[in-house]
Amino acid sequence: MKSSHLTEENLQAYLLGEIQEKSIAEHLSTCSGCQKNLEEYHRLLERIQKINPEPFPFDLTALAMETVIRYEKKRSLKREWVFWGSLFFLLLGISSLSIPYFSEIKAILYPKSSIINLLTIGTGLAVLFFLTADLIRQFNKKTTQLFKNNMQPTA
């Protein structure tokens, strides 16, 4: 047997403004039982809205962020060690590969004046310094972006 009254879901949705059907409004104008249920839901909703949430004795967001920051610092430290280790082994590899050619490099630089040798070595060191500084800057920029985006990789 089918009930001629509105369901609780329909009454609640009507009260919250989720549905606006004429048939529901017409039924409510004629059915005192459904009107009574709708009034009860309305009073219940008013009481729920008057309830103040109980405050936490501590800031949950700050506690969670401390944990996230601590975790990120550990990850950042590991990444930094990997970065510097990789850079060290790269420079060590390049240096070891250039040892057989050291005598040829020395022969090229030896007959030149000491000023030209200093300028050549100084230029090489300056280029190495700027490339290393750029690598460090890019690394710091990427880690900062990751942290600002809640550790979500950016495309």
Image: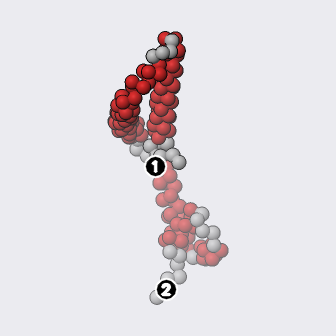
Q: Amino acid at mark 1?
A: Ile
- First along the sequence among labels 1 and 2: 2
The residue at the point 47 percent across, 22 percent down is 108
Q: Residue furthest bottom?
A: 1
Question: Element type at marker 1?
Answer: loop
Q: Camera-side residue: 107 or 37?
A: 107
Q: Amino acid at mark 2?
A: Lys
Percent of width and height locating residue 106: 42, 21
Q: Camera-side residue: 135 or 106?
A: 106
Q: Is residue 133 above or below residue 117?
A: below
Label 1 packing within 10 angstroms: few (<14), some (14-19), many (20+): few
The residue at the point 50 percent across, 52 percent down is 49
Q: Which residue is identified by label 2?
A: 2
Q: Which mark is residue 142?
A: none
Label 2 packing within 10 angstroms: few (<14), some (14-19), many (20+): few
Q: Is residue 152 above or below residue 129?
A: below
Q: Which residue is identified by label 1?
A: 51
